[in-house]
Amino acid sequence: MSTGILLAIIIPAVVVIALIATAVSFVARRRRLQKRFGPEYDRTVASSDSRLAGERELRAREKRHDDLEIKPLPSSSRERYTRDWAGVQQEFVDRPEEAVHDADKLVTSLMHERGYPTENYEQRMKDLSVEHGRTLEHYRAAHEIDGLSTQHRATTEQLRGAMVHYRALFEELLSNGGQSRRAHA
């Protein structure tokens, strides 16, 4: 066989193999993001201009999150938060709106103690999405109801629902659910 014929066979074969490897890598990266972010993957992609833009946003969240110093709680803090949560739940019986506000403050305090920045709600959501994407919708729903209750527009049933939603994220944060990868290292 001549060199020209060999090159005519080898070059297209190498290009096809490279394209297959790129496609496999792309699919694997997408699956990893879908697994890590759960429902937040679909939400972010849907709100972006394209799938690639959404995935770029999720990778940027991961990068920012890796720079945070997320830490597990000491047992004394975990016990204190557990007592505080029980108090907020008891408060709900007589003062449901105030209890929901206090639940929001308690969850925010817990986030802060774990190492999450808490100044900006939208950024808080992005930071939490990296390790808590499966419970983030609970937090989003609770926060929305908390906003309604500030205007005295939430029903008692909505306020009860907010408490349930806050509890889902609270328990995950309290138990160090979705722990930082550094904590596993």
Image: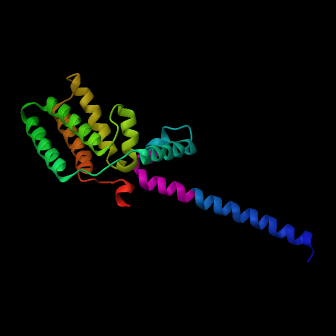
* In the foreground, 75 or 89: 75
Q: Look at 28% across and 39% down and name the residue there.
A: 112
Residue 23: image quadrant is bottom right
Magenta: main secondary structure: helix
Residue furthest to the top: 151
Left or right of 51 in this view: 169: left
Magenta span has 39?
yes
Image point (91%, 72%), residue name = 3
Q: What is the span of residues highlighted in magenta in the rendered image?
A: 27-42
Q: Residue at x 13, y 38 (%)?
A: 88
Q: Percent from the top left, x then y, of residue 154?
A: 21, 28
Task: State the residue in front, 157 or 42.
Answer: 42
In the displayed structure image, the side of residue 112 where residue 37 appears, left or right: right
Foreground: 136 or 181?
181
Residue 78: percent from the left, percent from the top?
18, 49
Whether residue 147 is situated above or below residue 90 in the rendered picture: above
**In the rendered image of this protein, does residue 149 appear above or below residue 74?**
above
Judge by depth and name the residue closer to the eye, 144 or 15. Answer: 15
Q: Considering the image in quadrants, where does the N terminus appear? A: bottom right
